[in-house]
Amino acid sequence: MFIDPSVKETKKADYKAMITVGLDKSTMNYYVIDSWIKKASIENMLKATFRLYEKYHHNLIGFESNGFQILLKPLYEELEKEYQISLPFKTVEHYHQSKNIRIAPLSPLMERGKLFFRKCGVIGASPQFGEWSVESGVSRGGTSTPHSTLQTPHSGSNAPLDDTKILIEQLLYYPQANVNDDGPDALAGAVNLANSFVSKNNVISVGAGKRESSKLLKNYKY
């Protein structure tokens, strides 16, 4: 999972985003397992991080180092003591790299049919990951997830769908200036974290060129 916390305290603050990605090493397919994209308070984001970890038990939770160290590290540490849970944080240095450069590698993954999105999902429940969508294709999954033990406003059988639809919309209209890009940025970070578990010799190199990702996203069925 990768977190884009959007810690700006302004009326025009961006969405906060946490994207969970799974990687099937046998096919090098990436699965967007959970999308949490909300204009929420920092407190709600912190608690949601623990709920998502209890549900998915991530190998790594990524954060851009500056935003994490300055503001959020001590807040997470307090909740770790309260919940008796140690989160597997990994800070990432972007070295002033622009969002455009970070997000650009998602395009070839979508064009090649290697990035799959959940067609539906319920936060707080324990669904079987059954249907995945990339362009018009669907593949079948079959891994269950443990039920969260943390009490949140969205736990239970009547919980809302996750925010995959918002993620798709942000990807579709990126990089328009009036569209938030926190979801795509967090997705790019999550994909990079997944790649960190794969040997460099197994990573497929994709060249640059004209991208058709927006056409694929328009075919996505909610």
Image (spheres, helix red, strand yellow):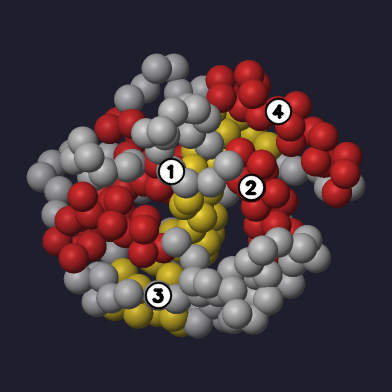
Measured Cα–Cα span from mark 1 to mark 4: 19 Å
Looking at the image, is mark 3 or mark 2 nearer the viewer?
2
Q: Nearer the viewer, residue 127 or 157?
A: 157
Residue at x 61% of width, y 45% of height? 45
Label placed on residue 15: 1
Looking at the image, is mark 1 or mark 4 nearer the viewer?
1
Q: Position of residue 188 (x, y in %)?
A: 41, 43
Whether pointer 1 and pointer 3 mark residues with C-beta atoms closer than 8 Å, the reply is no
Measured Cα–Cα span from mark 1 to mark 3: 22 Å
Q: Position of residue 130 (x, y in %)?
A: 50, 82
- Quarter the C terminus occupies: bottom left
Q: Residue 114 appears in which quarter of the rendering?
A: bottom left
Under tag 3, what secondary structure?
loop
Residue at x 29% of width, y 64% of height? 113
Tag 3: amino acid: Lys
Whether pointer 1 and pointer 2 mark residues with C-beta atoms closer than 8 Å, the reply is no
Does 207 sit above or below residue 152?
above
Tag 2: amino acid: Asn
Residue position for label 4: 73
Measured Cα–Cα span from mark 4 to mark 2: 15 Å
Under tag 4, what secondary structure?
helix
Residue position for label 2: 44
Residue position for label 3: 119
Task: Give the left or right position of residue 216, taking residue 34 as reference.
Answer: left
Q: Earlier in the sequence, mark 4 or mark 3?
A: 4
How crowded pointer 1 is (Cα within 10 Å; few <14, some 14-19, many 20+) is rated as: some
The outermost residue toward the front is 11
Under tag 2, what secondary structure?
helix
Does 63 sit above or below residue 163?
above
Q: Position of residue 118 (x, y in %)?
A: 43, 70
